[in-house]
Image (spheres, rainbow, N blue to C red):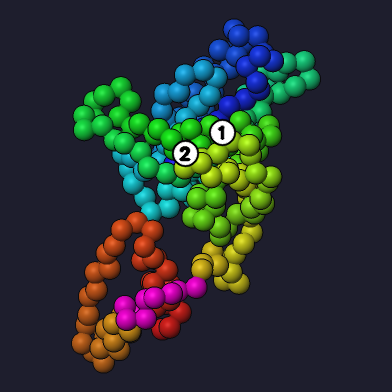
Amino acid sequence: GPAGGGGEPAEAVDPEMLYELIVQLRPFAQMVAQRYDGTLGNLPGHRLLIYFGYPQKHEDDARRAVRAALDLVSEAGEQLGRAWSWGRERPALRVGVHTGPAIVSASPNTPEPVVLGATLDVALKLQASAAPGTVVISAVTRSLVRRGFTIEALGPLTASTGSGERLVPYRVREGTDLGEDGTLDLVPLVGRARELDQLMSRWEQSRSGNGQAVLLSGEPGIGKSRLLRALRERV
């Protein structure tokens, strides 16, 4: 999903200064995007767009988007504050993150191969609702990144999603929701008893001296890593 970022309201800043600030922001945003395998897209006006899932796809793209958003707001002051200020004010980004469908052009050489449509609309509504220096995410993104972050619900917005539902933003911060071993405390394993039994059977055969190899495959986010962790806990 996209992470759309912007700074002070456009009407509060001299247009030429705003333009220069965006010019300074783009290479900084590009650096953060590359850090998490995101792509810096084109967005008119005084906002920036980073999207995840194309051309590189990862199982944790939603988490990557949120981490990139947190880095953007936390590092923006250090990167830009020394050079740009309006009176006593310093630039502060506000970021909205939403996860949803996108259309990818059949020709990768088109100027903008990814069309986000309603997914971008929701991200921009979230971004507009965020306080300076904060990251807000949608309920969909929250369902994918609930572990490892501190997340608090904010009041519903008057704006709605493309399906007409009330849009509820969630503010996200760096969190410490970790297990006792220092790893993410993942959700309980549900509906994978047969697969886990098969893995345990192969493990027992290996212990008896009959070596085994197992290929575990599936769509991103279906629970492969969670199944492997359950196996490690069993053995």
Q: Residues within 10 Å of mark 1 (few under 14, many from 20)?
A: many
Residue drawn 71% across the image and 23% down it: 90
The amino acid at mark 2 is Gly
Magenta range? 188-196
Mark number displayed over residue 125: 1
Q: Is residue 189 magenta?
A: yes
Q: Quadrant of the N terminus?
A: top left
Residue drawn 46% across the image and 79% down it: 233
Image-based side of 85 in relation to 148, left or right: right
Image-based side of 11 in relation to 123, left or right: right
Position of 58 relative to 102 (above/below): below
Which residue corresponds to mark 2?
Answer: 162
Mark number displayed over residue 103: none
| SS under mark 1 | helix
Position of 14 relative to 61 (above/below): above
Residue drawn 66% across the image and 28% down it: 92
| SS under mark 2 | loop
Q: Residues within 10 Å of mark 2 (few under 14, many from 20)?
A: few
Callout count: 2
- Can residue 73 be seen from the camera position used here? no
Q: Quadrant of the C terminus?
A: bottom left
The CA span between labels 2 and 1 is 11 Å
Residue 118: x and y, percent? 43, 35
Image-based side of 97 in relation to 228, left or right: right
The amino acid at mark 1 is Lys
Q: Is residue 191 magenta?
A: yes
Q: Nearer the viewer, residue 54 or 162?
A: 162
Residue drawn 61% across the image and 44% down it: 169
- Can residue 38 be seen from the camera position used here? yes
